[in-house]
Image: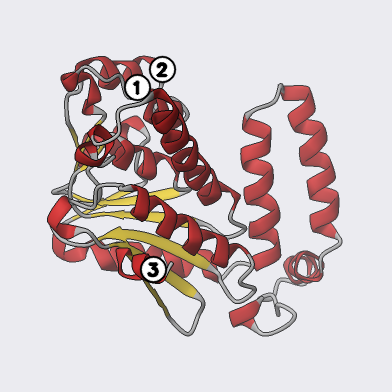
Amino acid sequence: MNANANLVLHTRDARGVITLTLNRPEAFNALSEEMIAALAAELDAISSDEAARCVVLAGAGKAFCAGHDLKQMLAEPSAGYYEDLFARCGEMMLAIQRLPVPVIARVHGIATAAGCQLVAMCDLAVASSAAKFAVSGINVGLFCSTPGVALSRNLGRKAAFEMLVTGDFIDANEAMAKGLVNRVAAPDALDAEVESLVARIIEKPKTALALGKALFYRQLETGVAAALADASQTMACNMMDGSALEGVQAFIEKRPPRWPGPRAAD
């Protein structure tokens, strides 16, 4: 881990907002084996961090992330190596959605192939108007199958498939219209737009966010009846939490809620 420490920069503020910055600017933040391991380690640490409230995933340099490190991939061309690499990358991607706190992609530049997958796997995404997105593996004869899993769960099927079979770029506004990103801001207003979303999230009770996020992804993969049954149990559990009981009481009494416990670690 020490050798990979600078591949993902970790900063946090007093509120428990953590920023993870992919730090291979000279390689457009391509996901090398080492980068995948470093990011996986950071996500694992955050999963048990009781003070964490929100994660922002960013990239250093000109790009957000240009996908897998193709030069490294060609150095050991074997089916076993590729299966292991994509499996480890898939686990890292799933770790984003398994975190109990929301994860926001801060996309300032290009996000291609597995970099586009990263954006799609994050819970939310804010893009600069200068950002561009593509799953361009098809241009070199490699269908972006793993990015396609995430992409098809964000975009409509035909929109996702068109990106996958053409490899064409879409701009930030088109990405928002198609459902890949939530908000678009001018480059010099990107951080302010991310912060406005962060601030809205962390003012909510942590327990409710954690329960809701876990349920949100579970129910997507089930039928409607099973999803409603799971959601009913989650709601019942959530209602027994002190924050929910206080919030409902405050609504009835027409007053602001007084969340129990320290706000920063709620």
Type of amino acid at the residue the image marks with label 2 = Arg
Q: Is residue 122 above or below residue 207?
A: above
Residue 230: horizontal and vertical position, in percent? 79, 37
In the figure, residue 45 lies in which quadrant? bottom right
Looking at the rendered structure, the number of numbered marks drawn on it comes to 3
Label 1 element class: helix
Helix, strand or loop under label 3: strand
Which residue bears the numbered disc 1? 160
Q: Earlier in the sequence, mark 3 or mark 1?
A: 3
Q: Which residue is mark 2?
A: 157
Specify few, some or many for label 2: CA neighbours under 10 Å numbering under 14, 14-19, or 20 or more: few
Of 23 and 182, which appears nearest the observer? 23
Q: Residue 19 bears which disc, if any?
A: 3
Task: Please tell me which residue lies in front, 184 or 250.
Answer: 184
Residue visible at 38% across and 44% down in the picture: 118
Query: In the rendered view of the protein, which quadrant contains the N terminus?
Result: bottom left
Q: Could you say whether the residue bearing mark 2 is in a helix, strand or loop?
A: helix
Q: In the image, 241: left or right of 222?
A: right
Question: How many neighbours does mark 1 have within 10 angstroms: few (below 14), some (14-19), or many (20 or more)?
Answer: many
Q: Are marks 2 and 1 in contact (CB under 8 Å)?
A: yes
Q: Residue at x 75, y 69 (%)?
A: 243
Q: Earlier in the sequence, mark 2 or mark 3?
A: 3
